[in-house]
Amino acid sequence: MLSFAGMHHSAESLVPEPDTLGVDEQVENDSEPLPLKLTTELWAGLSPTQRSVYRRAETLIEELEFSRQASIGRLLTTGPGGEVLRALEVLEGMDLIRVEPTGNGPLVKLIALPSDHVSIIGPDGRQRWVFIAQPIDPPDLDPRSLN
């Protein structure tokens, strides 16, 4: 299996420091859902470049939803190459896609869809975010192994 370096930041790195929130970091369009089910709080902590990559990642999810797989070559035709590759890194880091080698080059397979980001407070009192994704195919489990 091929692997991209994970770009999806740990929850702590996505949460902005209170003094870094500014008017210029507000959500551009409140009626439009944020990409990859990000919350407004997480979105506010992203740089403009990161926001662009997350938007591209959302368009790749939309591109993959119907066929559930595509060659990297085809996906690279959907936008600027570097941004598409960074978006694929985000999606792989979130375990939403799997990249597999084939005789015709790498194949990207959609394996889950983003569902939510949930805020929790850890035992140390710090806020953290838990990302929830819904698998496209149910896991193949032996019923005897379940509780």
Image: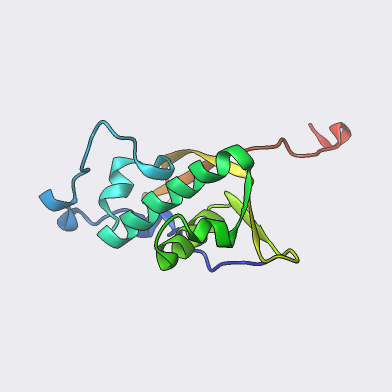
Q: Position of residue 99 (x, y in %)?
A: 64, 59
Where residue 11 sits, quadrant-wise, is bottom left
Considering the image in quadrants, where does the N terminus appear? bottom right
Q: Residue at x 56, y 67 (%)?
A: 4
Q: Position of residue 36 (x, y in %)?
A: 43, 44
The answer to whether residue 105 is seen in the rendering is yes
Where residue 13 sits, quadrant-wise, is bottom left
Q: Position of residue 137 (x, y in %)?
A: 70, 37
Q: Residue at x 41, y 58 (%)?
A: 79
Q: Residue at x 59, y 37 (%)?
A: 66
Q: Residue at x 30, y 56 (%)?
A: 46
Q: Is residue 102 left or right of residue 113?
A: right
Q: Position of residue 39 (x, y in %)?
A: 34, 41
Q: Is residue 77 left or right of residue 16?
A: right
**Residue nearest the viewer, comparing 128 with 138:** 138
Decide: is 111 above or below 144: below
Considering the image in quadrants, where does the C terminus appear? top right
**Residue nearest the viewer, comparing 83 with 104:** 104
Q: Is residue 8 left or right of residue 46?
A: right
The answer to whether residue 7 is seen in the rendering is no
